[in-house]
Each structure stands twice: as C-alpha cells, then as structure tokens.
Amino acid sequence: MSTLLLHHTSYLDHLTPVGHPERPDRLRAIDRILEHEKFQALERDLAPVGALEDIARAHPMAYVDMLHNLAPDEGLARVDADTTMSPGTWEAALRGVGGACRAVDEVVSKTVKNAFSASRPPGHHAEKDRAMGFCFFNNAAVAARYAQKVHGFDRVAIVDFDVHHGNGTQDIFWSDPTVMYCSTHQMPLYPGSGAADETGDAGTIVNAPLDPGSGGAEFREAMDAVILPRLSGFEPDLVIISAGFDAHARDPLGGLNLTETDFAWATRALMEISDKHCDGRVVSLLEGGYDLEGLARSVAAHLLTLMDA
Ligand SMILES: [Zn+2]
C-alpha cells in the first residue's frame, strides 16, 4: 500500500509579514524536492475544506466565529505578536483541518498505508480558544477527535517532535484519558510549557524536554527512554505525528542539532509501534521548519520512510 500526500495551492495564500519565518516559500521548497522521481509512487490529492463541526470538537464555536470575523478583506490582521491573518488565511486554515481529516479517512479505509498533510498555517500552538505561535486551528487535535467520533477509535496518540512544545495540543487534551500527547522539544524555548512534570489530569501528557544544543543522540535517548515506551503502553488505535522539522541543525528558530537522518529514525520508530498496535495507521501533519533546505530535506527523509512501509 502507498503513502498519500495531501496538499493545496490555497496554503500559499496565507500571507505573513515580510521577513516572517512561517512563509509560503516553505511549501514551495517542499514541492520542489517532491518533484524528484523518488516520489513518483506517492499518491497525491487536494485537501478539502474542513467542516466547522469537525473543528468544533477541539475549539469552541465562539472562537471559530471570532477568527472568521477577524479575517481581513485586504492587508493583514494581527491576532497575536507573531500571528497574523491575510485574506487567504481562513481558507488555508480550513483546508489544513480538511487535509488532516481526509488523511484519517484514507488511512482508516486502507486506501493508503499512511498519509502526510503538507499544510500551513501549522497547528500545535493553537489552544482551545487562543490562536498563537503562527497557529489558528489545531489540526492534530481536530484529527484525533475526528478519528474518535467519526471512525469510533478509542485511543489516539499524538507524537510531536517539533522543536517547540505543542502547548495547544496539551491544553486541549489535558484532562482526556483517551488521547495521549507525547512531545520532545527544546527547553527553555517558546512557548515555555512542556516540563517533564506536566503530565495532565489523566496522566496521558508525556513531555521529554531537551537542553539547547542537544543533537541526535539526546533526541533518540528521549524517544527510547520516555516517549516510545509510554506510546507502546497506551496501545493506540491511530498514531498522529505533529511533524515539525525546526529541530534541524540548520533551523534559525531552534537550538537543537538534529539531521534528516534523525527524523527518518523517529518516523521508523513510530511506524514500528503503529504496526504493532494499529495496523500501521500513521497520519503525519506538517508543523514547523523554517530553514528551507533543512525543511525540504527533512520532509523528504520523513516521506521516504513512510513510503517504505
Ligand atoms: Zn516549531
């Protein structure tokens, strides 16, 4: 079975201020590297517009309406210090959740083995009712709830190796015993959350912070010693990856020293746990990654691993 890539040109229409790291060129760099013949076997599909009822399982409708009302007809509307909406942001954000839910559908129905959604804006900093850190809707959280409500799964795991802690995902699932959130991230770093003693009301939050300057050895140790045993013990019905690639050594926002080889290793490790517990069902969603070359090479390594299922 193959790997599905979900994409859409509307993701390029979410504009940010000049010099902002979360920019349309990120997806252009990914598109360019995926033109290589090594990716011919990828199934490719356009991300649909997500349904408001799906978003509402992770965010209150009052928050969704507030964002919709903020969306400008021209220019940029500031949502927080580093998060802005342009006229194209609303559709891009809706298709981000739409791509994530479609990825769940296709993996569950076994039309593909696994799926990667190359969307922007990213999602893991978006809390229940707060846009921040370049994020509006928490795609991973919406996809997890969608898998539970629409496909009847009991337990969904979200594993996040973005260099930043996914405070939004942690916020949404803090008291939910049916969703495990596991994160490796640099600490201290934005947004400041993610200490190892933040475990959630249900004990299903698993944080493995890494010191600035940590490289592949420290990352793999955190995965092997903390994340992977907890993930395996949870026996998930679906594994969702919050795939941020800003822990790459080249990244300008992060201070970790991972390489694309480390991301491929982590992808393989998560696929092995998924093979053991849930028939290999993996849905991966793009989060951060701000050095264009480091991002493109990391996405390529991640996808080649997913395709080698
Ligand atoms: Zn990040």
Image (spheres, rainbow, N blue to C red):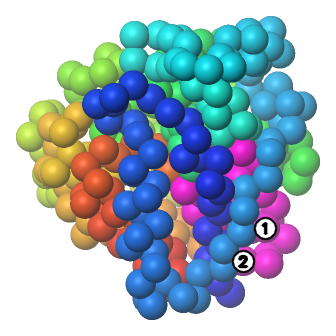
Q: What secondary structure is found at the residue carrying circle 1?
A: helix
Of residues 64 and 271, the one drawn nearer to the viewer in this rendering? 64
Discs 1, 2 touching: Cβ within 8 Å: yes
Q: Residue furthest front?
A: 74
* Amino acid type assigned to the residue bearing label 2 in the image: Val
Of residues 120 and 16, the one drawn nearer to the viewer in this rendering? 16
Check the image and report above or below for 237 versus 109.
Answer: above
| Mark positioned earlier in the residue sequence (1 or 2) | 1
Dividing the picture into quarters, in which one does residue 300 lie? bottom left
Residue at screen point 30% across, 21% down: 190
Position in image of residue 218 (x %, y %): 17, 50
Position in image of residue 2 (x %, y %): 65, 83
Question: Left of 108 or right of it: where is 271?
Answer: left
Residue at screen point 50% across, 33% down: 15
Q: What secondary structure is found at the residue carrying circle 2?
A: loop
For disc 2, the neighbor class at 10 Å (few under 14, some 14 to 19, many from 20) is some
- The residue that label 2 is drawn on is 112
Report the magenta residues as a range: 95-118
Question: Left of 81 or right of it: where is 2?
Answer: right
Question: Left of 279 or right of it: where is 222?
Answer: left
Q: How many marks?
A: 2
Position in image of residue 82 (x %, y %): 39, 18
Check the image and report above or below for 103 versus 181.
Answer: below
Q: Return the mark for residue 267.
A: none
Note whether ligand 1 is within 8 Å of mark 2.
no
**Residue 262 showing in the rendered view:** no
Dividing the picture into quarters, in which one does residue 239 lie? bottom right
- The residue that label 1 is drawn on is 106
Residue at screen point 61% across, 68% down: 5
* Amino acid type assigned to the residue bearing label 1 in the image: Glu
- Quadrant occupied by the C terminus: bottom right
Position in image of residue 21 (x %, y %): 32, 35
